[in-house]
Image (cartoon, helix red, strand yellow):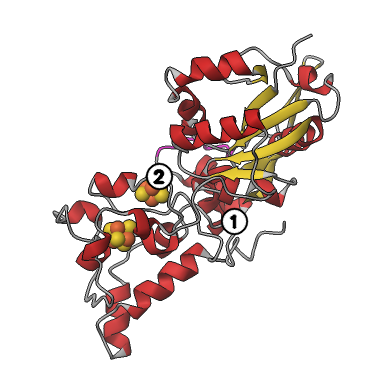
Amino acid sequence: MSEKPKIGLYWCASCGGCEESVVDLAEDILGVVEAVDIVFWPVAMDFKRADVEAMEDGSITATLINGAVRTSEQEEMVRLLRRKSAVVIAYGSCAHLGGIPGLANQFDREQILRYVYEEAPTVSNEAGTRPSTEHRFNGDRATLPSFHHAVRALDQVIDVDYYIPGCAPTPKLLKQAVEALLTGALPPKGSVIAPDIALCEECPRKDSKPEDLHIERFHRPHAVMADPDTCLLAQGIVCMGPATRGGCEALCIKGNMPCTGCFGPTSRVRDQGAKILSSVAASIDAEEEADIIATLETIPDPIGTFYRYGLPGSFLRKSLSQSS
Ligand code: SF4
Ligand code: SF4
């Protein structure tokens, strides 16, 4: 019988980029495949839920789950995988923090369904038909998962052992995590497997970031030609670097784009959006309330800007009209 560690991979509410990032291991993937037995990876191999149900509890060495939890099927699967796995790793921003799907928590379920099936300009649905969780036809029964009221990060549903951050995580971090699993050199439970420093500390532009910023208006990155050598925040472009964990080696900054915060906060920051909001507010070069408001209004989508990846786990969490 094989003695190799057994690895599972699963996705919930996500775009698929995290699954793709496993392939980004490139030739290193061959070493991983050699060293482990992949016992569940529905996106790439033909495994069924029944295969997992038949496994002994705790028999999977580690399961990497990407994506947030939005539907009943996702919740059932992550609970099942938790039971079958010795270690569960939240892989990527959506499992770690709720991610982009978590921005839907600004709206309640009814608002979302009404817009998607009735009000969206591209929809033609005069009968107002919505998907139902059960349908019977000619004696057959078809079912669909139910749509929960809110999006949750993985640790809001099950116990999570480790987190690998990023949208998507970098191959370097995934490789580090796999090596830690294979050698047993795992960090303390609950660790985020990435450096616990702010992104600004590893940013090639950090020396151009002034101690005190004086911002009169904010610019959207596509609307200006940013100087490629100067701190983006100093140029009035919202950059989440001060409130975001390092470890990506400033990927977006090197592409002359601001950090949008996908690695989440460091351990010293409780709420990533609140942290950057307070630092941005303190940088506004205005005294009068009207001038401060006018400057803030140059940020067109504050929740999408400050909570792009972390709304479900933030202090704001979800719209008050959501019931669960
Ligand atoms: S705010 Fe952004 S651009 Fe400026 S130093 Fe920090 S990460 Fe770099
Ligand atoms: S710069 Fe920010 S948004 Fe870009 S990969 Fe790094 S942490 Fe994510």
In x, y percent, where is residue 199?
39, 56
- Figure check: 19 above or below 125: above
Q: Is mark 2 within 8 Å of ligand 2?
A: yes
- Circle on res. 248: 2
Q: Is mark 1 within 8 Å of ligand 2?
A: no
Residue at image coords 45%, 42%: 167
Residue that carries the numbered disc 1 in the rendered image: 312
- Figure check: 48 above or below 302: above
Q: Mark 2: few, some, or many residues within 10 Å (few <14, many ≥20)?
A: many
Evaluate whether residue 86 shows in this view. Answer: yes
In x, y percent, where is residue 136?
77, 23
Using the rendered view, name the quadrant where residue 5 is placed.
Answer: top right
Using the rendered view, name the quadrant where residue 303 is placed.
Answer: bottom left
Q: Please state, as top left, top right, bottom left or bottom right, where the C terminus lies in the image.
A: bottom right
Closer-to-camera residue (89/112): 89
Answer whether residue 47 is magenta in the image.
no
Using the rendered view, name the quadrant where residue 162 is placed.
Answer: top right
Q: Which residues are magenta?
A: 122-128
